[in-house]
Image (cartoon, rainbow, N blue to C red):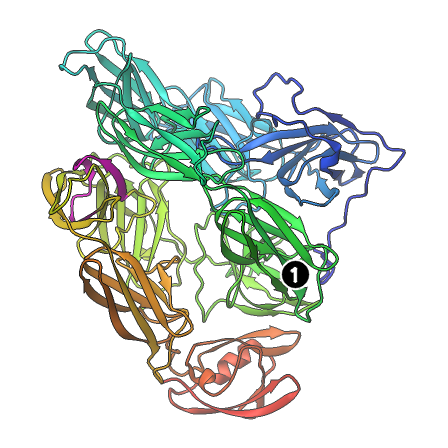
């Protein structure tokens, strides 16, 4: 563990005049399947990585170094990486690898060592970027593949390990690169060995004929013993393909899409088919000549289950057609369009636009999400596009040019320009990529050729784990100015122990989240549980968690808060959070596991929140750890219209079982009171009270349909509100109650245009405007509100459908206030003043938290409108004494400031160089 304050990483030396290195073109043949290479040659003028490869014994000559560049996602689910170059290191362990600006994965391999991998960025305008790769001692993984529940060996299973390139958080994705994956086939006894691995975490997949694909994320290598990988049996899809007259269609190609690769077969005599597929959700389609069809809804098959009775009816040619144009109307040639099942995975169709921007894509009837990308333009996604039988649905797409510009300056808190600061623009457009540059000597930067739409603009000091982030909406051919003021960095370090006082058995994660705005920082401890994080100076809440924990749940009064000093370091030891997690399994109506079901955990009370996770390939799920004694949850599981609910779920009752009930069928018609019937519309399903369905957005609740009728065979069996909107601004809604496995019909009348809802939030104490209050329309509180109140406390919700709505307001760290409002067609409705209250301080406390800063105790956070805040205390004030007793650490501050509710307490406080006495009344 480096000493506090000495965490600066050494920079690799440049290749010296006497050194030699070999650089291999990216398209050199290799027997194994390889990641596609860049189509454009990399020139020396583009700049380069200067890579230094080291091991415990020093520099490593002859190491093979590879570089992959992250490209725009084409929407197919294929890895967005391209080989950018490779070579071997010289005698001093260095290699100059030409590379244009962008985000890369670098790896190094050498005999007798485990591989080293690292994510690295080549900023625009920097001629050379130095990177060091340290080769570890290689380790092995031994295991065996067995049949679930029988312990019989499964021979000839393909076992693959894919590494995490960076910190292996539960939300990180492993690298899907053939060159960096390790694969082996199990023997006749199901045993396998993978050697030459780097210690760390991997995603393991195993698949064998007759079995479903099994995935083990966050697998720690090496293991203490033999790893046993249990494989579930494969699922089987059986059915028939018939023509428009109902006669068997012999020789039709049947495709099941939705897994890592499509499954295909051809119908035999009688039109029958059988497809062996891994457990999961699939779209089954068929084609013979120009005739095509599809099972109306996606189908889910459990491990070992045979799903019979599927019928595909072939109809006339159908699909999507239209044009792709630029914003000024010019046709776009060479745009790539990819269609996937609405809300699902797997490519079902692909097209490329012609010279005139025209395109056509053959697709069976159904709902699709369509992604379109073209060089120099901003990617676009159209969700829930419906294809009707025997027709081509028109879909005209207009792309914005990628000509947005972001510029600004980065300065210190003293106003001095900061040179060499990396600034990133991360596009949130479909398939968007990031662009990075460095500030010049005047602290200025400029990023050009950016995609339009929402983007995250980030800046940080070199070595800091925390990015300062701004969210901006970029416009074509427009310069957006974003200036940053970066505080000086400091270091927080310490020891993580278990509750018993022992060190963790393996490395764990430490997360630092700022008290206020800004990004978090994450690091991994070493094998002894020691950690260090370089962060911008400020106040942070710290928590230590296991890698597999699916989210971060902070408990304000229990988790440590620390003030990271500028230019110095502070020690903060942590106790690993090992509170029990709520776990369970989602089961199909048949009793088999339900792979990849969405589980929503709903917590009510003054601080409502909905947490959504997805079950794994065996139906198992785990929720983020909560503090002991947290209130019970309502669990909702959803998979393809099949729905299960469980109330009163808690951690001490885990594991839970959620049994799904069959989906329902909903048929309906959209009726125009005046004007022409609609030729298409967007349909949305919501709770009966108008709230968002709990599984959104992980499960689809909205789809675009053609014509004026609809049939949903995968609707949830419950009370629903059905909303529709047409392209010409008409809207409508209706209520319907469906039973599991049953069917229902509904008529949705169209009304006039949309309305709006506005209002003002005011504080309960004093009645002043409440800025920054999150506003939610017809849905529970979440991390992304529909609006926020401005400095005057006002808010406005536009594009609201006529009818009854629920508006929820939640102030920062406050209680939720709910209002029900009914709006008329094309009218602006004002709900007036809504009184909101901040989070109440715990009785007997000051409504404050403390941190330790170099032997001093500081106020780290304050409950808004709490006792300390009302007395004039501010974050950063130093607490010297309580009722005349000197405070020496955080523990003393917390114990001495607690007392009888409503009792007074005298605080000796220092702000800057001035001391004063503050009288505070503890919360009642």
Position of the C terminus, as image quadrant, is bottom left
The stretch of residues the image draws in magenta is 701-724
> Splitting the image into 4 quarters, where does residue 248 fall?
top left
Where is residue 610? Give x, y as percent: 33, 56
**10 Å neighbourhood of mark 1: few (<14), some, or many (≥20)?**
many
Residue 11, above or below 92: below
308 within the magenta span: no
Q: Which residue is mark 1?
A: 410
Where is residue 765? Give x, y as percent: 35, 83
Residue 584, above or below 67: below
Magenta region, mostly helix, strand or loop?
strand
Closer to the camera in the image, 4 or 920: 920
Q: Residue at x 46, y 31 (%)?
A: 332
Closer to the camera in the image, 664 or 522: 664
Q: Residue at x 10, y 44 (%)?
A: 747
Q: Is residue 41 left or right of residue 303?
A: right
Where is residue 428? Give x, y as percent: 47, 46
SS of the residue under disc 1: strand
Instruction: Tell me if residue 489 can be seen.
Output: no
Q: Residue at x 45, y 71 (%)?
A: 557
């Amino acid at each position: 563990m480096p000493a506090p304050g000495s965490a600066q990483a050494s920079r690799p030396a440049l290749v010296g005049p006497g050194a030699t290195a070999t650089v291999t073109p990216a398209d050199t043949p290799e027997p194994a399947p390889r990641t596609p290479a860049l189509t454009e040659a990399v020139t020396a003028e583009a700049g380069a990585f200067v890579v230094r490869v080291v091991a415990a014994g020093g520099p490593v000559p002859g190491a093979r170094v590879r570089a992959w560049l992250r490209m725009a996602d084409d929407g197919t689910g294929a890895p967005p990486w391209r080989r950018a170059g490779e070579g071997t290191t010289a005698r001093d362990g260095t290699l100059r690898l030409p590379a244009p600006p962008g985000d890369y994965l670098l790896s190094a391999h050498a005999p007798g060592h485990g591989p080293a991998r690292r994510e690295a960025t080549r900023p625009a305008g920097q001629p050379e970027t130095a990177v060091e790769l340290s080769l570890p001692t290689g380790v092995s993984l031994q295991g065996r593949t067995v049949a679930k529940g029988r312990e019989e060996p499964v021979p000839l299973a393909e076992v693959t390990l894919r590494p995490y390139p960076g910190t292996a958080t539960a939300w990180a994705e492993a690298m899907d690169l053939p060159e960096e994956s390790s694969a082996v086939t199990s023997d006749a006894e199901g045993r396998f060995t993978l050697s030459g691995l780097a210690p760390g975490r991997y995603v393991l997949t195993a698949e064998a004929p007759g079995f479903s694909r099994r995935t083990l994320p966050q697998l720690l290598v090496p293991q203490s013993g033999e790893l046993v990988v249990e494989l579930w049996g494969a699922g089987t899809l059986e059915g028939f393909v018939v023509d428009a007259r109902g006669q068997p269609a012999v020789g039709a190609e049947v495709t099941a899409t939705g897994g890592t690769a499509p499954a295909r077969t051809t119908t035999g005599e009688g039109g029958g088919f059988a497809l062996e597929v891994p457990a999961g959700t699939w779209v089954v389609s068929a084609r013979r000549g120009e005739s095509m069809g599809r099972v109306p809804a996606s189908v889910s098959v459990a491990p070992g289950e045979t799903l019979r009775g599927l019928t595909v009816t072939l109809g006339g040619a159908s699909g999507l057609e239209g044009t792709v144009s630029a914003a000024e109307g010019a046709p776009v040639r060479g745009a790539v369009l990819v269609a996937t099942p609405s809300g699902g995975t797997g490519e079902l169709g692909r097209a490329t636009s012609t010279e005139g921007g025209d395109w056509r894509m053959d697709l069976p009837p159904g709902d699709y999400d369509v992604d379109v990308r073209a060089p120099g333009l901003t990617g676009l996604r159209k969700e829930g596009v419906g294809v009707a039988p025997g027709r081509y649905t028109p879909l005209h797409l207009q792309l914005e040019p990628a000509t947005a510009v972001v510029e600004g300056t980065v300065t210190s808190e003293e106003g001095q320009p900061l040179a060499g600061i990396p600034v990133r623009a991360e596009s949130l457009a479909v398939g968007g990529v990031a662009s990075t540059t460095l500030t010049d000597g005047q602290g200025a930067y400029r990023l050009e050729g950016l995609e339009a739409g929402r983007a995250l603009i980030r800046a940080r000091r070199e070595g800091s784990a925390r990015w300062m982030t701004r969210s901006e909406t970029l416009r074509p051919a427009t310069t957006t100015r974003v200036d940053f003021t970066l505080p000086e960095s400091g270091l927080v370090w310490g020891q993580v122990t278990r509750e018993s006082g022992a060190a963790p058995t393996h490395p764990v994660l430490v997360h630092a989240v700022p008290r206020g705005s800004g990004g978090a920082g994450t690091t991994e401890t070493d094998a002894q549980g020691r950690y260090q994080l370089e962060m911008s100076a400020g106040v942070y809440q710290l928590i230590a968690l296991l890698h597999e924990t699916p989210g971060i749940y902070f408990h304000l009064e229990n988790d440590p808060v620390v003030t990271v000093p500028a230019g110095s370091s502070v020690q903060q030891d942590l106790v690993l959070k090992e509170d029990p997690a709520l776990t369970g399994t989602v089961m199909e109506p048949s009793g088999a596991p339900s792979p990849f079901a969405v589980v929503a955990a709903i917590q009510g009370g003054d601080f409502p929140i909905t947490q959504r996770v997805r079950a794994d390939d065996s139906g198992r799920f785990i929720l983020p750890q909560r503090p002991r004694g947290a209130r019970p949850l309502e669990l909702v599981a959803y998979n393809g219209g099949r729905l299960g609910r469980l109330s009163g779920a808690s951690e001490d009752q885990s594991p839970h079982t959620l049994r799904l009930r069959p989906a329902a069928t909903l048929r309906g018609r959209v009726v125009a009171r005046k004007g022409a019937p609609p030729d298409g519309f967007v349909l949305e399903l919501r709770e009966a009270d108008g709230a968002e369905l709990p599984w959104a957005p992980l499960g689809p609740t909205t789809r675009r349909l053609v014509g004026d009728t609809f049939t949903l065979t995968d609707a949830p069996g419950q009370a629903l509100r059905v909303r529709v909107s047409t392209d010409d601004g008409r809207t409508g809604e209706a209520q319907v109650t469906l039973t599991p496995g049953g069917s229902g019909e509904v008529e949705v009348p169209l009304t006039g245009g949309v309305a709006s809802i506005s209002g003002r939030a005011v504080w309960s104490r004093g009645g002043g405007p409440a800025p920054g209050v999150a506003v939610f329309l017809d849905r529970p509180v979440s991390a992304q509100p529909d609006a926020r109140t401005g400095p005057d406390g006002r808010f406005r919700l536009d594009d609201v459908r006529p009818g009854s709505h629920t508006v929820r307001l939640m102030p920062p760290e406050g209680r939720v206030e709910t209002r029900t409002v009914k709006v008329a067609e094309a009218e602006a409705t004002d709900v007036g003043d809504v009184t909101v209250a901040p989070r109440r301080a715990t009785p007997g406390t000051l409504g404050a938290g403390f941190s330790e800063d170099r032997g001093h105790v500081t106020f780290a956070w304050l409950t808004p409108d709490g006792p300390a805040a009302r007395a004039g205390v501010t974050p950063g004030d130093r607490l010297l004494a309580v009722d005349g007793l000197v405070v020496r650490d955080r523990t003393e501050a917390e114990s001495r400031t607690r007392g009888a509710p409503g009792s007074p307490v005298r605080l000796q406080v220092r702000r800057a160089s001035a001391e004063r006495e503050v009288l505070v009344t503890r919360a009642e």
